[in-house]
Image (tube, rainbow, N blue to C red):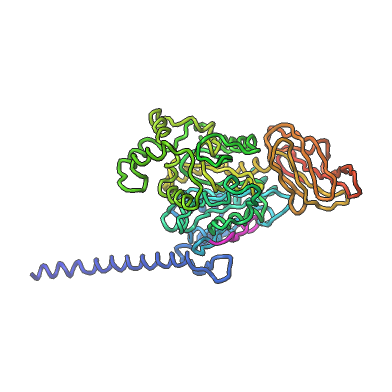
Amino acid sequence: MARTAAALHKGFFPLMLSHLVLFALGAVLSAAELAESHYTQGSSMPDLSLLSSVHLRSSSRVLHQDTSPEEMYRQQQQYILSRKLSNGMMWGHMADYVNRCSHIARLFSIGKSERGVDMLALSISSSGGGQEPSKPAFKYVANMHGDETSGRYLLLLLAEKLCYEYDTNASVKRLIDTMRLVLVPTMNPDGYALGPRRGNSNFVDLNRNFPDFFQSPAGTDLRLLQGREAAETLAIMDLSLSQRFVASANLHEGALVVSYPLDGNRDGSYTSGQSNSPDNKTFRRMALTYARLHKTMSKTQGSRLRPYARLHKTLSKTQGSRLRPYARLHKTLSKTQRFPRSRLNRKLMNILNLMTKGSHLRPYARLHKTMSKTQGESTFEEGTVNGAKWYVIYGGMQDWNYFAAECMEVTLELSDQKDPSMQEMAKLWGDNEVALLQYPIDSVFTGFRGQVTSTGGRKLAATVKVKKIEHNITTNEKGYYFRPLAPGKYKIRFSAPEYSSKTIMVKVPKNNLGTVVDSVEQGELVSFPSARREPPLSLASTVINFSGLVTF
């Protein structure tokens, strides 16, 4: 009995110690979660003083002042790739990044999530991240679906590369000096924190939540709200409309491919098939540009929608409604060509998207053909695919950007595996590092660009129309325009209210460096003949030299 009591006494203190450790850890984690959900009232930035030391890490405490840029870059990479970053940890890192790299970057909030969480972004340019109308702007948006997490880390790694290789890497310097880059590491902070899960805190799939061109009455202004947009959607809409991005890319997971518009069909159906935008040729070239810069993506030929082994494991374990039993799938989807548009059915479709991750959109017969061939459908071409040819969605972000914001956006599907482990993240960075750096430059500078003014030097709000392409763009507040186009010869018409129009010919080369407005030398003003008394338009051309630097 005495020995038993002694043994109990002997084990009591280790047991108590372990409980105290667990209690302390729980307190730290609770403080961390509290920090992620509380903000200074009326502030557009999170109150970083609320972030615990677990979240807010200052590099100045770790790195000595005489640490070389190479060593600092290595240590920052190591930190990003060493652990899963909570929203609070990511905010702390972004705040620290701006302190270290204030010569090129600034941190701002684009809005708040449904739970009131700030959605932070980095703006990077030679002016310290400020807007410059004479420079084109590009944005990367990641973590739109909370369970597709790699973009959070890839964009932080890209930011570090831009900071520490500015003086040594010609491509980095060209990007920062000639354009502005905006990075949104998470569009769905709530979905990430609550799972991670695909939808936001209200189970809304944000990539089905934008005003849709094909499901709106003719003539609808897609820049206006339609009443069903989530807070996260509104934040991206406001960012896109206010900052006039030339091009954009949205980072996802679930395949290895670049998807380009259009995602929807003109007849409103859910039947998969090629759905071309007026700029299909340019979008296809932009998608190929990223796929070929990626280490392996351009070699992707099959659709790789749902590998048989993963599908089989899922279906064999499914008992409830999460993926629906096979019989219900077969009876419903084998006959479904179009999904009714009622508000109730849209909500049901949204919930079903979240539960099945889109697998219900693919009829069983097509899945069966894919599985029987084991290589997938021949949907991907050199790592690219038209969105609707892959699978149809409505309310998607890339179609909205094109129709409403004059922004050429593509979707980057960067991994077959959703929410990859940190061991896989380093490889993903290696596969995408060059592409993430080079793609913004190639996408905004291909085509032609310049400035529209009156002969008296007044900056004009003009419309730029490419003949045979029914998609116009407008100049910014200083008269500058940037029009991505695939290589070829085009007839361009410039027009502005109360001014006569002018039509010129432009040849876009194949080198992604853009072109000079035909026969116009740098900075020369060309008077447009006017049939009326109003002052004529004039063009100030943009010259691209062979180093890729843009001058006006």
**Is residue 5 magenta-colored?**
no
- 6 above or below 257? below
Q: Quadrant of the N terminus?
A: bottom left
Q: Position of residue 141 (x, y in %)?
A: 56, 50
Q: Quadrant of residue 444?
A: top right
- 209 above or below 548? below
Instruction: Work out which residue is located at the far top of the displayed protein and give it.
Output: 373
Magenta-drawn segment: 101-112
| 75 lies left or right of 447 | left
Q: Position of residue 20 (x, y in %)?
A: 30, 68
Residue located at (51% from left, 42% from top): 413
**Is residue 104 magenta-colored?**
yes
Q: Position of residue 323 (x, y in %)?
A: 37, 45
Is most of the magenta stretch helix, strand or loop?
A: strand
Residue 117 in view of the camera: yes
| 32 lies left or right of 97 | left
| 481 lies left or right of 371 | right
- 148 above or below 267? below
